[in-house]
Image (cartoon, rainbow, N blue to C red):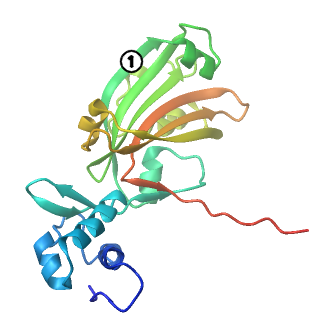
């Protein structure tokens, strides 16, 4: 890491944060590796403890590192960048990022559609619905909790299938000849509850992304309703904005 420039108007904590971030992005620090201690960074860069802690706090907020009480500071995989994209499953999304996806099935079975689920799927109240709740992993790290609701009329027998390694979209296509054509997804910033935090291996009250997706077939018929809670330190939403031409 380069030495800090005291002749620049840029705050020292920001320079230190940027230097560590660039080293992580360049692969000089690998995921899981421990960073030097606060005292080591203070001595190396000749800065105060406040400066080091501010730099590490910002890196933690950005998802580049995690700080473990009594153990130290460790590098995480950089947050996954998400923006406008094609309609894909979580499994395909992770493949796009070069990561292996796994799932832990928390709940799987047939339920009676609640008023909210029935309205979204455009089916009668209490109609049989397949519910699949999974903890989603990338490279063994929890990324989010997802609960999917699918009308049983469209997918008979699906409740008996294994979903630890299977993609729900792959099952739609291969077993039922159903091809998701479009979706509408809404994201809202939330604080992770204590119950969800225990599964996601994060702290209660930490930032998260709540997502709701409605998936449709080509004829506009609803196929799937999904509710997700994703770790806020593992995702960031990136949008490319273009100013419209002036007339």
Image quadrant holding the N terminus, namely bottom left
Residue 136 lies in what quarter of the image? top left
In the rendered image, the vertical position of residue 159 relative to residue 8, given as above or below: above
Q: Nearer the viewer, residue 168 or 173?
A: 168
Q: Position of residue 39 (x, y in %)?
A: 11, 73
Q: Residues within 10 Å of mark 1 (few under 14, many from 20)?
A: few
Q: Nearer the viewer, residue 12 or 231?
A: 12
Residue 179 lies in what quarter of the image? top right
Q: Nearer the viewer, residue 165 or 80?
A: 80
Q: Secondary structure at mark 1?
A: strand
In the rendered image, the vertical position of residue 165 relative to residue 37, given as above or below: above
Locate residue 137 relative to residue 122 in the image: left or right: left
* Residue at numbered disc 1: 109
Residue under the point 26% across and 43% down: 203
Q: Residue pushed farthest bottom? A: 7
Residue under the point 32% across and 89% down: 6
Q: Position of residue 243 (x, y in %)?
A: 75, 66
Q: Nearer the viewer, residue 12 or 22?
A: 12
């Amino acid at each position: 890491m380069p030495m800090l420039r005291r002749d620049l108007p840029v705050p020292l904590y920001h320079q230190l944060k940027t230097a560590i971030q660039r080293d992580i992005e360049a692969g000089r620090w690998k995921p899981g590796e421990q960073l030097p201690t606060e005292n080591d960074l203070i001595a190396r860069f000749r800065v105060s403890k406040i400066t080091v802690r501010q730099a590490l706090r910002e890196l933690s907020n950005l998802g580049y590192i995690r700080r473990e009480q009594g153990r130290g500071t460790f590098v995480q995989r950089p947050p996954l960048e998400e923006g406008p994209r094609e309609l894909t499953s979580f499994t395909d999304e992770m493949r796009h990022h070069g990561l292996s996806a796994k799932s832990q099935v928390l709940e799987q079975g047939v339920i009676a559609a609640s008023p909210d689920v029935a309205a979204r799927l455009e089916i009668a109240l209490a109609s049989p619905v397949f519910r699949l709740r999974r903890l989603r992993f990338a490279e063994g790290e929890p990324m989010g909790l997802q609960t999917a609701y699918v009308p049983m009329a469209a997918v008979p027998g699906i409740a008996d299938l294994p979903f630890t390694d299977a993609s729900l979209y792959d099952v739609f296509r291969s077993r039922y000849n159903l091809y998701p054509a479009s979706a509408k997804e809404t994201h809202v910033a939330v604080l992770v509850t204590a119950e969800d935090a225990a599964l996601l291996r994060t702290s209660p009250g930490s930032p998260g992304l709540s997502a709701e997706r409605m998936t449709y077939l080509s004829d506009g018929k609803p196929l799937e309703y999904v509710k997700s809670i994703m770790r806020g330190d593992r995702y960031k939403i990136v949008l490319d904005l273009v100013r419209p031409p002036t007339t």
